[in-house]
Image (cartoon, grey):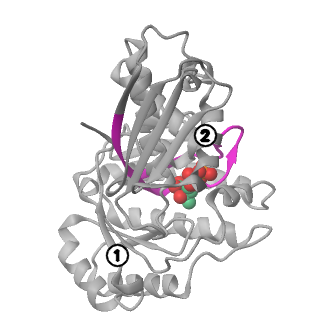
Amino acid sequence: MTEQDFIPSGYEATATSGSFTWRAPSNIALVKYWGKRGEQLPANPSVSFTLDACATTTTLRYKKREYPDDDFGFELYLDGAVKDSFKPKINDFFHRIGKYMPFLKHYHFTIETSNSFPHSSGIASSASGMSALALCLMSLEQEISGNITEEDFFRKASFIARLGSGSACRSIRGELVVWGSHPEIAGSTDLYGVAYPGKVHPVFRTYQDTILLVDRGEKQVSSTAGHGLMHGHPFAERRFAQASENLSALQQVLETGDTEAFIAIVEREALTLHAMMMTGKPYFILMSPATLDVIRKIWSFRKETGVPVCFTLDAGANVHVLYPESEKEAVMEFINNELVAYYEKGHYICDRIGGGAVALP
Ligand code: DP6
């Protein structure tokens, strides 16, 4: 498929007013997307666990305009309060997707959104937020298009979400989602996320992600600016190749249930992401002292007990603690006893692998 395939040839029906609601989850990458090219295309393939508890619920109310306007018309609410500071981002998003959803200027929208995770927790809401909005817009497109197959619906939702935030395209469907073309992964493409098609050992379908909010401050550098640092980065090309190699290696690991090999890939990916930021121009350290302490404690706990628990990081200081459900009691005891001093005001979020976005009545 190419971008052109997402431009509709016309609409068959009209819809004057109504609303759609979707709940879309966040996701945590095992092999990280870091660096982009062209219009929101990834510099390397990535794969993520879809989460369950961390999610955004968005209601899109639409009303047909009497005449289409040159500008996009919308209001935005976060947790019931007007949120004008989000408007420029949504406006840019509408500009980017206008070509693929030409109905947008024919409607006035009210977008009501809320996150299940605390505001300013340092958990990025762009993946879940952009995927929830993309799904609402797809529901409207479906209403006026007549026939869209389920497969086409979710494929285009992921394509549209990607144009809002790259990682959002991995928050539509599937427990494990691949985004970015990889020669060994059938159907993988830079244009949208696909459910990981390979065999997955049952142990990975039970994975838990306890997110320790060790630093709830504002991010020093936005993801978008961070991706930009990969342009001209001295290690960029090697890093992009390494991500593909890690995804190759992960396939067998996922199939056989080799948690030890899983840990080695996932932790190295997290540290490589941060290494890229530490060696960019300008350079950033996004880990905090608590992040490092937590990592060291996880390593000693793993060594002492043999429990296959590991960490991953996104572009910030918070630590995602990953482990099979069968180890939940032991790991939660460890978190509550040994890590309690590191996360802020007793904050952590217990999440787990989930199945993707759902439409709400
Ligand atoms: C470190 O998807 O937030 O979480 O495309 O600019 O919106 P934009 O970036 P974003 O980047 C996420 C980067 C990451 C790794 C990952 O999720 O793969």
Q: Name the quadrant containing residue 153.
A: top left
Q: Which mark is residue 102?
A: none
Q: Name the quadrant containing residue 276.
A: bottom right
> Is 184 placed left or right of 43 in the picture?
left
Magenta stretch contains residue 34: yes
Q: Quadrant of the C terminus?
A: top left
Which span is picked out in magenta?
Answer: 20-49
Q: Residues within 10 Å of mark 2 (few under 14, many from 20)?
A: some
Residue 45 image offset from top left, x and y in percent:
56, 45
Ligand 1 sits in quadrant:
bottom right
Q: Is the CB atom of the residue marked by disc 2 within 8 angstroms of ligand 1's nearest atom?
A: no
Please state which of residues 187 and 329 is positioned toward the viewer in this rendering. Answer: 329
> Is 256 placed left or right of 152 in the picture?
left
Residue 137 image offset from top left, x and y in percent:
45, 31
Q: What residue does disc 1 label?
A: 348
Residue at 68% of width from left, 26% of height from top? 70
Q: Residue furthest front?
A: 66
> Is 229 placed left or right of 153 in the picture?
right
- Residue 259 visible, this orientation: yes
Magenta stretch contains residue 313: no
The answer for how far apart the CA atoms under marks 2 and 1 are is 31 Å
Q: How many numbered badges does the structure rendering display?
A: 2
Tag 1 secondary structure:
strand
Q: Amino acid at mark 1?
A: Tyr
Placement of 331 over or under 239, stated as above or below:
below
Q: Are marks 2 and 1 in contact (CB under 8 Å)?
A: no
Q: What residue does disc 2 label?
A: 93
Q: Amino acid at mark 2?
A: Phe
- Mark 2 or mark 1: which comes first in sequence? 2
- Residue 243 visible, this orientation: no
